[in-house]
Image: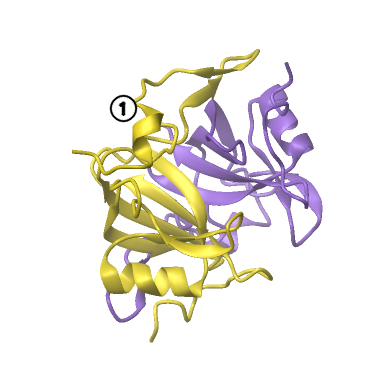
Chain colours: A purple, B yellow
Amino acid sequence: MSIADRVKFDDRGLAVAIAQDAVNREILMVAFMNKDALERTLQTGTVHYYSRSRNKLWMKGEESGHVQRVREIRLDCDGDAILISIDQAGVACHEGYRSCFFRRWDGTDWIVDRDRGVDPASVYGRKPS
Amino acid sequence: MSIADRVKFDDRGLAVAIAQDAVNREILMVAFMNKDALERTLQTGTVHYYSRSRNKLWMKGEESGHVQRVREIRLDCDGDAILISIDQAGVACHEGYRSCFFRRWDGTDWIVDRDRGVDPASVYGRKPS
């Protein structure tokens, strides 16, 4: 059986993919995978997604060095959502936060209640030293 | 500011919504919310989703009694994914598992490695006692 056999990709060929920190279980990001992205993720052990805006497969951390190593892959009951337990190098968010979910609803507004792990200008353009 | 103001719903009017156990941080389910579902979730403190298959708003646990009480709502950097920290009554999955992610890829197949919390026949049709 191929890993994609039981996955129900939608009419765009995509499934929701959630990246969760393997150690502290923090949700780091949500993106989409097509069949190719899922298969490459399994083959390489490094998470690949499909970008809807760029219409292409991408390896997370390809430019920034902030790669995600796979620990475990799970599938939900409907087969249309994938949960990946990962080890995150650096930060997951392109804005420099460890998690993309750095804003919390406080009753009146979405407030940022997390600290930036790195300067966002450093996330792309060069690999972290 | 309304809670939906910064949320970027897609061309179907939907955003991905992830329910995470507030205590042990287990991911319980993934579904979709439209603007109305998000606003009702905030107003009532009980999670509402939008069903793509039934084309309607629904309160999670409306039939089963397995409601989700909101502890915290977070938004990702792109504004198109919502993370809800919840207290789950009973089980989240309609198949009787606490989490919908009860299958793990073991290298050759998706294997069920979680125990059912309740008989799936009991999830709908009557409230848990």
Q: What percent of the width, then of the height, locates residue A36?
A: 78, 36
Residue A99 visible at all: no
Q: Chain of mark 1?
A: B
Q: What percent of the width, then of the height, locates residue A92?
A: 52, 49
Of the pair A127 and A14, the residue shown nearer to us: A14
The residue located at (79%, 59%) in the rendering is A54
Residue B49 visible at all: yes
Residue under label 1: B117
The residue located at (47%, 81%) in the rendering is B5
Of the pair B19 and A26, the residue shown nearer to us: B19
Q: What percent of the width, then of the height, locates residue B27?
A: 40, 41
SS label for mark 1: loop
**Quadrant into which the C terminus of chain B falls:** top left
Of the pair B34 and B57, the residue shown nearer to us: B57
Residue B111 in which image quadrant: top right
Please tell me whether residue B61 is drawn above or below residue B90 in the rendered image.
below
Of all residues, the one furthest to the bottom in this rendering is: B1
Question: Which amino acid, mark 1?
Answer: Gly
